[in-house]
Amino acid sequence: MNNIKKTSLLLGLLLFLVITKSTAQVDFNIRTITAGITLENLSDTLTLKESIAFLEGARKAYEAAGYTVQTIRISSQHLHELLAGKADQTTIVQLQAIDQILVRHNVSMAMGELVEGDTFDPKLVTWFAKLIEQTANLNFSVPIASKALGVHDQSIELAAEICHVLAGIGAGGEANFRFTASANVPSNIPFFPAAFHQGERSFALGLESPKILSKVFAQSTLKNAAQNLRAALNQQMKPLEVIAEQLAVAKDWHYDGIDTSPAPGLEASIGEAIETLTGLPFGSPSTLRACSIITGVLKNLEVKTCGYSGLMLPVIEDKVLAKRNIEGRFTIEELLLYSTVSGTGLDVVPIPGDTPKAVLAAIYADVAALSLKYTNKALSVRLFPIPGKQAGELVEFKNPYLTGSTIMKVH
């Protein structure tokens, strides 16, 4: 594209931002702008820095239009592709160098899957624990199911070993915040830790939008909630897409779309939104129906979508969900039930620190089976075994994105 055309597009984008900023009523935050890149190797800091520069420009464009951008993030190809079988101290040092750049710019990065397909390598457990301990902003996953191979029993064993070891690193089992087991997760998801990238360089948006849902549901019934929510989300998301498309052309980056999942935060509760619709505490009868209504809307909007685009129920990232857990209103099994009609599986679920590795593996296997049963549904599992804690005990966290709750019982 010639410079004259690029300049014209940028001027058009600036004009749109001025108009949007003066007219938009924003009921949500942009949780993340995530850039997807392919690194040449683990020493490829040039591609990394170019993506950071793009993200910082994209953040400024959205902030100029009146939006709050909470984080900027990067995803790369799978870690196992970059390691090429060399999981040693040299590769840890290379990954530390990447991590230092990320920390300097306040950017997080997901490097996809640690292993390819259905694999168990016990040597990777110690190496990976050391990597997590010596980095701060890198995220990873292990695949536990795929359309091609079905349930990955060996990878499930690896994921259970890693989860168990990470629980002992740092305070309160929080090292598992940067690790997940993923089932049928597609590329170019903007949300972490399951994200990874394939194809040309691209970017996607992820939103923190429960406040839109609460506002709509306060004026809706179960019968008209879907219609009302669809109209509100289309209205709020279309301006985001216009800016993204302008950025894609002006900066020569492919636009993947919006992951419409209403990711909750400590000040934006999806539990509150569901309770506004049902009139009952989360976990009561009608919760499943509300989850189904929301997810049906999220997957059928008039914007380009990507990623999960489903309902997220992260127990210790949502104050209402955490409170209902303290009250004993739902179980792990019921969270799995809600996953059949919603989004991400089991996310940041606090469990007893002495939960056996075989039981961790069994939970992973259940999620893997569920993802295959429902048309290769994208699901992931972040379990938090909390050292020294038993079911029913209260737990608090140092991580600013997590809220206190009680340890859930594992039957």
Image (spheres, rainbow, N blue to C red):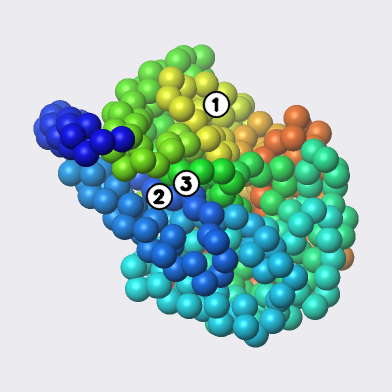
Does residue 330 appear in the picture of this structure?
Answer: yes
| Residues at circles 1 and 2 in contact by the CB criterion of under 8 Å | no
Q: Which residue is mark 1?
A: 299
The CA distance from mark 2 to mark 3 is 17 Å
Crowd class of label 3 (few under 14; some 14 to 19; many from 20; radius 10 Å): some
Q: Nearer the viewer, residue 95 or 284?
A: 95
Residues 295 and 377: in front is 377
Which residue in the protein does label 3 denote? 201
Residue 307 screen position, x and y as percent? 55, 39
Q: Earlier in the sequence, mark 1 or mark 2?
A: 2
Between the C-alphas of marks 1 and 2, the distance is 19 Å
Provide the secondary structure element on which disc 2 rests. strand
Q: Name the residue beneath numbered marker 2.
A: 32
Query: Furthest-front residue in view?
Result: 2
User: Which numbered disc, 2 or 3, marks the residue closer to the eye?
Assistant: 3
- Indicate which label's residue lies in the foreground, 1 or 3: 3
Q: Quadrant of residue 395?
A: bottom right
x, y (%) of residue 318?
Answer: 48, 52
Q: Residue at position x 60%, y 79% from top?
A: 92
Q: Which mark is residue 351?
A: none
- Disc 1 is placed on an element classified as loop
What is the three-letter code of the residue carrying label 3? Arg
- Camera-nearest residue between 8 and 234: 8
Which image quarter is the N terminus in? Answer: top left
Asked if disc 1 and disc 3 are in contact, CB closer than 8 Å, the reply is: no
Q: Amino acid at mark 1?
A: Lys
Q: In this image, 6 relative to 138: left or right?
A: left
Q: Is residue 243 visible?
A: no
Q: Could you tell which of marks 2 and 3 lies nearer the N-terminus? A: 2
105 horizontally vs 282: left or right: left
Report the residue at 88% width, 55% height from top.
Answer: 153
At a point 80% along the width and 53% down the height, the residue shown is 117
